[in-house]
Amino acid sequence: MSQDISRGAAGGSLGRLARRPESGAFLGLVVVYIIFAVLGGKVFLGAPGWSSWLNMAAEVGIIALPVGLLMIAGELDISVGSVLPASSLTVAILSGHYDLPLWIGVAGGLGVGLAVGLVNGLLVTRTTIPSLIITIGTMFAVMGLTLGLTILIAGSTGVFVVPDALTKSVFGAAFGGMFQIGILWWAGFVLIVLALLHVSPWGNWVFAIGGDRDSARNAGIPVARVTIQLYMMSGFAAAFVGVTQVVTFGSAQVAAGSSFIFNSIMCVVIGGVSLTGGAGSVIGILFGTMTFCIVNQGIFYSGLDPNVGSIIIGALLLLAVLSNDKFRAIALSYAAKKK
């Protein structure tokens, strides 16, 4: 009798685990890491390997978090790829070209992200145009303004800046010789977004908006305000990464940032966030980001052709969508049985 109870408890625990939205992402992370640990050998398993994918994960992961929240709410933000270089160049122009204190440059760079997010949020909430189209439009607008103003002011597409020791230690330092301080910032962002989405009532609003926007509005949820807040979070995150990059490398380029658009979305999808909104988790986004970056950097350490890496990432994305649908079907079937 006791054995039956223990087996039932174990089965129930496994069942609850399988119904978690991040279960598929965790399994994918484990499988991918084992594969590249075998192919990459000791170098990949050591500090060089860990630092390479963690440094990448910190940058794309900070942006993926609010992008994931937007997708849970049924929205998209493509403009992050233009906000990143815009914020970097704002810092470089203000503090490098005009020699203003670096804190003014950093504030200006972060302000650019908040401003673009505000514009996106207002356009999405006050028009009937899909967020994909709106953010593509703002992306090209910001890219054009960034290019034009940078050439007009600095006379080139790149601007240099020499950060002071304090700012360098806060945004661009490295520990252990290889690990960027951005990893710690990423961990902080994860904890904050985790509390917002899964602990605070505000997180319930995000899920409700993604599930049914009209029902959420009828229930008294401030849909427009929450949507604007989400876009401003997305813009701020992209700008923050831009600030860390310019402080770390001492220069900013107009062409930087485009890869973050689809990389962040892939991390979110691999992490189990529903493409139609209303489902997902911060832990899943964390797992998805780690999985994507392990594959991306593992290709280098394994000696495989980079083209093979693109095939693996594409296949991983498809498998993630299929497995996420499977785990969601399991959860829905269990919920139906409970009724």
Image (cartoon, rainbow, N blue to C red):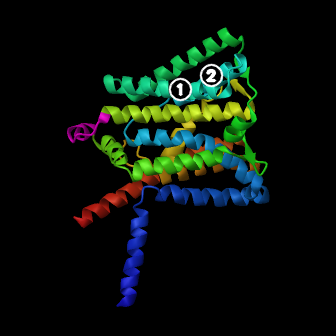
Q: Are marks 2 and 1 in contact (CB under 8 Å)?
A: yes
Amino acid type of the residue tagged 2 in the rendering: Thr
Farthest top residue in view = 152
Q: Which residue is mark 1?
A: 111
The kind of secondary structure the magenta stretch mainly shows is: helix
- Residue visible at 63% across and 48% down? 184
Q: Is residue 242 above or below residue 197?
A: above
Residue 21 x, y percent position in the rendering? 42, 55
User: Magenta stretch?
Assistant: 213-223
Judge by depth and name the residue closer to the eye, 213 or 219. 219
Quarter of the image for the N terminus: give it.
bottom left
Question: Was residue 219 drawn as part of the magenta stretch in this picture?
Answer: yes
- Residue visible at 73% across and 30% down? 163
Residue 167 x, y percent position in the rendering? 69, 35
> On the rendered structure, is 19 left or right of 136?
left
Q: Would residue 261 be visible to someone looking at this image?
A: no
Q: Would residue 193 be visible to someone looking at this image?
A: yes
> On the rendered structure, is 67 left or right of 92?
left
Q: Is residue 64 above or below residue 235?
A: below
Q: Which residue is mark 2?
A: 90
Residue 6: which quarter of the image?
bottom left
**Gap in angstroms between the C-alphas marked 2 and 1:** 10 Å
Residue 138 x, y percent position in the rendering? 48, 21
Q: Is residue 181 above or below residue 168?
A: below
Query: SS for tag 2?
Result: helix
> On the rendered structure, is 257 left or right of 23?
right
Give the number of marks: 2
**Pointer 2 or 1: first along the chain:** 2
Question: Was residue 150 drawn as part of the magenta stretch in this picture?
Answer: no
